[in-house]
Amino acid sequence: MALPLEAINRESAREKSIRHGHPSTLHLWWARRPLATARAMLFAQLVDDPVSHPDLYPTDESQRRERERLHGLIERLVVWENVRDESLLEEARAEIRRSTQGAPPPILDPFAGGGTIPLEAQRLGLDSRASDLNPVPVLINKALIEVPPNFDGQPPVYPGLADSQMRTWNRAEGLAADVRAYGQWIREQAERRIGNLYPKADLSDGSKATAIAWIWARTVRCPNPACGIEMPLARTWWLGKKKGKEAYVVPEVVADNADPSGRSVSFHIGHDVALAPKANADGTVRRNDARCVACETVVSKDYIKTEGVARRMGTVLTAIVAEGNRQRVYLEPSRVAIEAARISPPDDVPRAELSRNSQYMGAPLYGLTTLADLFTNRQLVALTTLSDLAMEAREQVIAHGGSTDYADAVTTYLGLAVSRGADRQSALCSWDSSPSKEQVRGVFARQAMAMTWDIAEANPFAKSSGTWSESVEWVAKVLDYLPGRGSGRATQQSATDADMAGVVISTDPPYYDNVPYADLSDFFYGWLRRTLRTCHPALLGTIAVPKQEELVANPARQGGKDGARQFFEDGFRQVFERAQDLTSDEYPMAVYYAFKQSEGDEGSEASTGWETLLEGMIRSGWMITATWPSRSELANRIRSVGSNALASSIVLALRKRPADAGAIDRRTFIDALETELPDALRKLQQGQIAPVDLPQAAIGPGMAVFSRHSAVLEPTGKKMTVRSALARINEILDQVLNEQEGDFDATSRFAIAWYRQHGYDVGAFGDANSLANARNTTVDSMDREGILVSRAGRVQLIRPADLNPDYNPVEDLRVSTWEALHHLIQVLESDGIAQAGHYLQAALSRRDGAVDADLVKELAHLLFRVAEGRGWNKDAISFNSLVTSWTEILEVARAARKPVQVQDAFDFEEED
C-alpha cells in the first residue's frame, strides 16, 4: 500500500533523540532501524491498499477516502509517545487481522541485529521470530521479545516490593521492578566490597567530594637520547569548555630523581582562557605522530605502536573530575588517587584475543590484543565484581520465591547492564569536554574500536554517566516500554539455515563489506558470557563471537577480495532462494538497504553492495514491486556533519516473480524506464528523499522494471547484468533531472545552465548574454533582480551567503524559483529552520503565486546533482541540507501566521 512517508520520516528522525525507555538503550547495537519505520513497513506489508478491493471501494473517491483513513492510522501509530496506547495498537492489529482473514502470518527477520523489526512485529500482535548468527544480538532479541511475555503481569519477588506498592502489575512492570531492586542490592554489595578503590577527592576548602572520573594519559619513553622522559600522549588537554568555567590540563616538566631521565611531567589545572590550549597545542598526539612535551621531538605512530606491542606503554594521572555544586570541579592529580588505582587485576577476566582488522580495530595495533587489555586493573575489578554479584542476585531471586526461569530472566537484564556499562568503564573511554556534556564518552562513539590516548576512568558509584545505577535504570526503563506480551522467539542461526516455512520476511540485511560486527561485539560478548553463561549455556558457549560464517565480505577471512565477494554473493543467494521456496506467497517481503551507489569499486558503474544485493534477490526469482525511502538518521550524527553521508534507508517490497514472466530486449527495457521512471522520481522527491539519496532510491523503481522480467537481453543475446541495468537507471535519472528544467521560469533556466558551466565563479558577459537571450531573459534584468552581478564584462551568480539578509519575498516585484531557493538556503544556514519556515511561508503567500514549494525543492535536487558531479562539495551540502530539513521547514511554514503588513513579511498577527 502507499504510505504517508512525510510523517514516518519525521518520526523516524525524531526517534534518534528519544532515550528514556527506547529499546536502543537496553544495550548497544549498531545500525538499528527506527521503530517508527519498522512499525509502518510491517503494517504496509500486511494491510491491503484499497485498490486491491474494488468490491468494497469501487470508485477512485472511495479508495482515496479509505487510503486517507489508513494513512491517518499510520501517522498516529508511528509516534513514539503512542507505543503504549493499547487502544491505538488494537486498532492497528484489527486492520491487520482484517487484511489477513483473521490469520496473520509469522514475521521473521533472519538478520535480526538490534531487534527493531521483531519487536515491532510483536507490538503489532504478530508471531515474531528473530534469528542471527551473532550471540550478542540474539541475547538482545531474547530480552526484547522472548523473555518479557513469559512473565506478563507477574508481581516482583524482591521482599516487600509487591506489598509496598499495592498495585496491579501489567506486562513486564514486575520484572522491571525486580531488576531495579536487585540492581540496587548489587550496588550496595559492590560498594561494600570495592568502594575503597574509589576515594573521594580533596577540594581546595578542605572538604571532600565524590570523584566522577580520573583522567589518565598513556605514556611512552621519548626516543630522543638527550631526553628519555616518560612523555604523555594526550589527544587534548581540555577538560571543560563551558563559557566562564573553562578548565584544561597544564603539563609542566619538573626534576624527578626517581625517573631514569631525571625529569617527569606534573599536571596542573588552568582556567585562564587567554592561556588556554590553542588548536596547534591542544594535546600531544596528532593524526600520524606525537610530540614530546619536554624536548619537542616528533615521535612517529610506528614507534608508539612498537612500544605498545612490547608492553612498554604506561599511564599517568593528569586530572580528577569531582562533583561540585551543579557543576564539575577539576582537580590536580593526588597521591591518594594514584595509589588507589595501583592494584593487581583479578584472575577470572575475559581474555579472548581481539581481531586485527586495522580499519575497525585500532587498539590491538598498539598491543591491546585481548579483551582484558581494554580495561584498567581497577575497571577489571569493578566489572568482575558486578558480574559475580549478578549471579549472586540470581540465587537471591530463587531464595525469595522466584522460579529458576524467573531468576534467569532477572539475571539476564542485570547481565546486560554489566555489559552495556563496560562501554563507559573501559580504557578506551575518553572525556567529552563540550559545554553540554562534560562526561565520559563511550567506547563506541563510532562503529570502531579506536585507540584512545587520554583515558576517562569513570567512578561506577558516582552520580554521572557510566555508573552502575545508570546502566540498571536504562535497562529497567526499556522493560517498562516493551509490549511484554504475545509470541516471540529468538534463535542463534545463520540466515541460510533459518526456518522460513510459511513466514513473511522483513529484514535489514548486512551491507556487503561494511562493518565486521562480529569483531566489534567481542567487546561485549566476553562480559555477557562471564555473567550469563549459566542462564544461557547454549548461546554463550563459545570463547568468542563466531566470525567465519558472518555474512560480510571480509578479504582477511575469505582469501582475498575475490573470495570475499564470492562468499557474500553465495550466502545472499542462498538466503533469497530459500525464501523463494519456503515463505508465504500472499504477502511481500520487505528488505531495508542503505548503501550509496558511489561507494562501489573504483571506476565502477554501481556499488558492489547494491549490485550484490539486487543480484541475489533477482536471480533467486524475486521482483521489486514498491520502493519506500525512509529517513532514518538525524542531520547531526557524527558522519553527517559537514558531509553528504546517506541519511535514508530504502525499503524494497518484493514478490515472487511469476513463473511465466517473459524476457525483453534492451530497447524495450530502456523505453519502459523512460516511461515509468519520471513519475516515480517525482514521487520520491515529493516524499522528502534527500538529493544525496536520490540515485540510490531511484534504483527501486528502475529495478522494478528490470526484475519483473525473466531476463533483459542485450543485442548480443546475453542477459543484461544487474550492474549494466544500474548504469542505465543512472543515465535515465540524469536525463529526467535535466528534463525537469523545463518546469522552471526563464530566469531559473538561465541560472541552472550558467551554474552548470561556472558554478558561482566568474564568466564572460558575452556568453551570459547569449545564454539569457536564448531563454527569453536578459543579464541586466537578472542583475537588477539580485540573481547575479554583471560588472566590467564579467558575470557571476550570487552565492546564498552573499545575498541581502534583509530581503523580503513579499515586497519583491518579481521572484524566480532560483531566487526563492537561494534566499531560503541563506536564511536556513544563518538563522536555522524556524526562520527558514517563516521565510518560506512569506514567499508562498505572494498573491501572484510565483513561488511553488515543490519546484523549490525540485531545483535543490537538480543543483545537488550538478554540484556533486562537479566536485563542488560545499554547494552540494547546502542543497542537500535544505531538502533534508524540508519537512521541518514546511511544518513551520504551514503553522506560521499569515503576514498582514506588506512592509514586513516577518511581522505576524493572530488571525481571527
Image (cartoon, grey):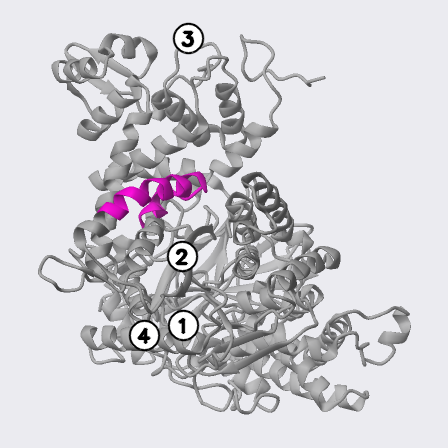
Q: Secondary structure at mark 4?
A: helix
Q: Amino acid at mark 4?
A: Arg
Who comes first in sequence, dot 3 or dot 2? 2
Who comes first in sequence, dot 3 or dot 4? 4
Q: Amino acid at mark 1?
A: Tyr
Establish if 675 lies above or below 425: above
Who comes first in sequence, dot 1 or dot 2? 1
What whole-number distance in Å separates the C-alpha atoms at marks 3 and 2?
Answer: 47 Å
* Horizontal and vertical percent position of residue 651: 43, 57
Query: Residue placed at 85% from the left, 81% from the top?
Result: 159
Q: Which residue is mark 2?
A: 625
Q: Which residue is mark 1?
A: 517
Q: Which residues are magenta?
A: 671-695
Whether residue 671 is visible here, answered yes or no, is yes
Most common SS among magenta residues: helix
Q: Which residue is mark 3?
A: 813
What whole-number distance in Å separates the C-alpha atoms at marks 3 and 4?
Answer: 60 Å
Q: Secondary structure at mark 2?
A: strand
* Horizontal and vertical percent position of residue 799: 31, 25
Query: Residue placed at 40% from the left, 49% from the top?
Result: 640
Q: Amino acid at mark 2?
A: Thr
